[in-house]
Image (cartoon, coloured by chain):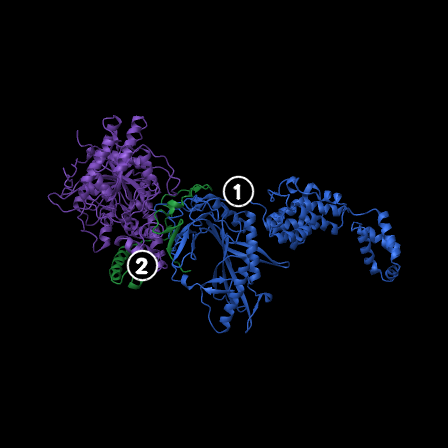
Chain colours: A green, B purple, C blue
Amino acid sequence: MSVDQATVRRIAHLARIKVSDEDVPHLQEELNAILNFVEELASVDVDGVEPMTSVMPMPMKKRRDEVTEGSIAKDIVANAPASEDHFFVVPKVVE
Amino acid sequence: MTDLTDLTLAEARDALAKKKISALDLANAQIAQIERARALNAFVTETPDVARAMAIESDARIARGEAGPLEGMPLGIKDLYCTAGVQTTAGSHILEGFTPAYESTVSANLWRDGAVMLGKLNLDEFAMGSSNETSYFGPVISPWRRQGANAALVPGGSSGGSSAAVAAHLCFGATATDTGGSIRQPAAFTGTVGIKPTYGRCSRWGIVAFASSLDQAGPIARTVRDAAILLRSMAGHDPKDTTSVNVPVPDYEAAVGRSIKGMKIGIPKEYRLDGMSPEIEKLWDQGIAWMKEAGASIVEISLPHTRYALPAYYIVAPAEASSNLARYDGVRYGLRVPGKDIADMYESTRAAGFGKEVRRRIMIGTYVLSAGYYDAYYVRAQKIRTLIKRDFELAFADGVDAILTPATPSAAFGLGEKGSTDPVEMYLNDIFTVTVNMAGLPGIAVPAGTSSEGLPLGLQVIGRAFDEETLFAVAGAIEQAAPKVAPPPKWWAVGE
Amino acid sequence: MNTHAKPSKLIKGATGDFEVVIGMEIHAQVTSRSKLFSGASTVFGNEPNANVSLVDAAMPGMLPVINEECVAQAIRTGLGLEAQINLRSVFDRKNYFYPDLPQGYQISQYKSPIVGEGVVIVDVSPTEQIEVGIERLHLEQDAGKSLHDQSATESFVDLNRSGVALMEIVSKPDMRSSDEARAYVTKLRTILRYIGSCDGNMEQGSLRADVNVSVRRPGEPLGTRCEIKNVNSIRFIAQAIEVEARRQIGIIEDGGKIDQETRLFDPVRGETRSMRSKEEAHDYRYFPDPDLLPLEFDQDYVDALKAELPELPDAKKARFIKDYGLPAYDAGVLVADKETADYYEAAVKFGGASRDAKLVANWISGDVAAYANTQGLSVAQTHIRPGQIAGIVDLIADGTISGKIAKDVLAIIIAEDKDRVSGSLSAIEGSDTAAMSGSVSDPRAIVEARGMKQVTDTGAIAAAVDAIIAANPDKVAQAQAKPSMLGWFVGQVMKETGGKANPQAVNELLKSKLGI
């Protein structure tokens, strides 16, 4: 499988990465080089094989239902590019 | 007395315990080395004040008889580990200036045991790379040079700052992380020891995620013993990481020097690649000979799905990364590039904040998860992962105690030599290491000789899940048998 | 699924009848102290970003650890929906960018939910019951909140809700009218509240509905559906369905075609409108969250949770019918609110006595409920204690007061006890003391103290009867000709005795003295 330029643009938008027109051809080439590299996986017989969901199978540990965190609004917004009254501030979102 | 920075971590520890030196002496000696070695670009952030303050506290604890196992040991921390109050960048512009209010579990474990932080070590951006050339903060230069040449070489990656700093004696040891070989490949390139423990052995909490199901923390150190000492402090169950495993952490140092007599060492035939460098082949054969001399038996084993590990890795790792890196959106921390609306802000921020390789991997990862391709790529790759793990399980079930392979397909290469036109060329560096991540197993890289150009070469030992002790024993035997290689001359040192 | 269109449910269009087909996705906030994957509080209404942990803000390197109580709540709810509990389920990441989604993905369950198919029995009216199939229930994280009206150019993001556990409960498209949809949500909310897995508070957003609506002519295959997002009251759900069905019928009758899309209900304008801005190429790239492991538990765990479940509404209703002889509809009304049902039983059983359970039901569903309504309270929240209702019913039963006087007694309790009763009004399940504590008035005492007792002394009643007969000879004649005039005499006697005469005794005396 290989990607065309429209797909490159679609993927970039899905990933929220701006690409310029001049970026598209070489991105296409690089992505296709990688896709070409992984192509040989198609030849592996995986019939009846379970996809791995956890490398180290074990029961999932669970937390007790206790409030152990919070009340650190100052720390939460400390690194924010824009904040006001402990809110994060972003360009207006149109619903 | 030799320069304090030429001691191994174990030697420095013992000297400190006998009160021959102080923690502050050690810290000052390292700070001086670091300041002279800026040409290597090993550190993103140096923290000399933090180091001295911690060393003074260490000396106080030693005086009170409360010394921890790593008391006063100056270490470097890969800048993928979040450190409270100290900038944590992941080697990326998008996190430049980010100062977490929290400390990663693994680094906190080191401070708990008395270690001293020298600073944050350079790395490939978000740990994506095999040469440290993708760092936003510039490439790290290896302390090693080819015999009779001045060309700058790469220290490997992604933990290139860690490997270079340890090899150049800028610290007694360093933390690193390994997703596809990022501890072992740089260790092999720099003549240092690097261990990627079993997945789940070290907590991932507070370490910037690259590929969650593959990432594992581990140390890079000058000797097998030093690596064992560091790993014991770093490892341990963490209730804050669901994938961290609750098993006791043994005294790894005790395993160093343990006899390997009677052990069964597997040699996977699939690792003998077509076109393998004769130098690497020779190194491997030498390793096999050392194993036999030490009383181990050698068996050829088969890991039939080996060749699929790297392609499968380049589906799984970018897929997870594309999702893990979605949080870098300019809203809560890090870089924000203004845009005409929210979507434009996201796209501009992420285009400017991520480097080329990271953008490429995010896009590949996004593609393989997208509608219509998920089963063909991602699910298939995860099935192949099951097969890769099964290969190892069968080998170990046959009584193999450890597996010996080369660590890398070549010695260190020059800056800008690889991957500039074809990304896959760079990816092939991980061909021997990546299977271990795919199966979650522990692997250690240990120096075993030098190339014809005088550059370090390493062997890799792979073990059963949670049997790092055997790795330390086997790696210790290789270290014993291998010819001693002098550290590189300090060509970088300003003012010596 | 209902395959045959019920004529009564059809909507008349200009060109014929249409059937509306409704399915719902309910997002129910799980009742828990802390969030699904972090230890931050779930309390509503705190300062911005106060209930936010490093995990909820998706700080670099943060990892989720699941809250065991949220898992238990999902299982309990699944059991309440008579649904299949999946002993193994998987958490997936749903990837998309939005400022109130800090991770850039929502942790949800896509392919393997914790709960599979189930069913809810819904009373649509006193005479109509339907079954609504449950497709699945899964656990997922809530998003934060963006405030858009603070500034013309900026939005403000608060992550207090980010990471709170939600149960998404997906129904099958089994509803055929807004009434059915309304009854379904009401019933679902009742079940959740009985179980205690969701407080069902729609105003605070604890329960939100996405409503899928399509229309078709009877007998035709399913039409194209539109999803109305985030409807936050039961009334709006019904309105949204009505207007959306009308809109779709209008388009079809004009020869148009329905576009499958997401719409928003505007209660002010009474219309739904397209949210095309949100429609752009969604590709959520679901994959199993590698930070978590599959969620696995054994049947013993499920059985233990099942054993601890309270009696659920359907079982309680059946028991009320059987044990108290209530009509199905009356029983249904009482069990719709668990505390009302408990209140009812406390009244029936108060003091260990047995009393007319049907009469108790009438008082609670009638006068007490009416009063509660005027106060905007539930029955159990009023200051009228179950023991007082029991007392009133007992006074009627032993002939101490008439039903009419009983209403006066209740009026006194309503007026005079109100300020005296404070503290835990919900303590009605426990002892009789809680059902009628020292601070409330005993109806018997009220009756005694105010001389409201029925006069059963025939001598006193006879005197009043004689006096009235003597004073109204013309009426006596009329009554003898037309026995229905008796009522007038009864009224006069009651008036004379201040309403306290035993009506039965008055009747008998009058009949004998008038010779009718």
Can you identify the residue that label 2 sits on?
A12
Can you identify the residue that label 1 sits on?
C304
Q: Nearer the viewer, residue C342 or C419?
A: C419
Mark 2 falls on what kind of element? helix
Mark 1 falls on what kind of element? helix
Relative to B7, is C128 on the left or the right? right
As measured in the structure, the alpha-carbon distance from the residue carrying label 1 to the one carrying label 2 is: 49 Å
Looking at numbered disc 1 in the image, what kind of residue is underneath it? Ala
Return the x and y of residue C224 as percentages of the image width and height. Answer: 47, 66
Q: In the rendered image, which quarter contains the C terminus of chain B?
A: top left
Pair 1/2: label in front: 2
**Chain that bears disc 1:** C
Q: Residues within 10 Å of mark 1 (few under 14, many from 20)?
A: few
Return the x and y of residue C330 as percentages of the image width and height. Answer: 66, 53
Q: Nearer the viewer, residue C55 or C149?
A: C149
Return the x and y of residue C354 as percentages of the image width and height. Answer: 71, 44
Q: Is residue B39 visible?
A: yes
Looking at numbered disc 2 in the image, what kind of residue is underneath it? Ala
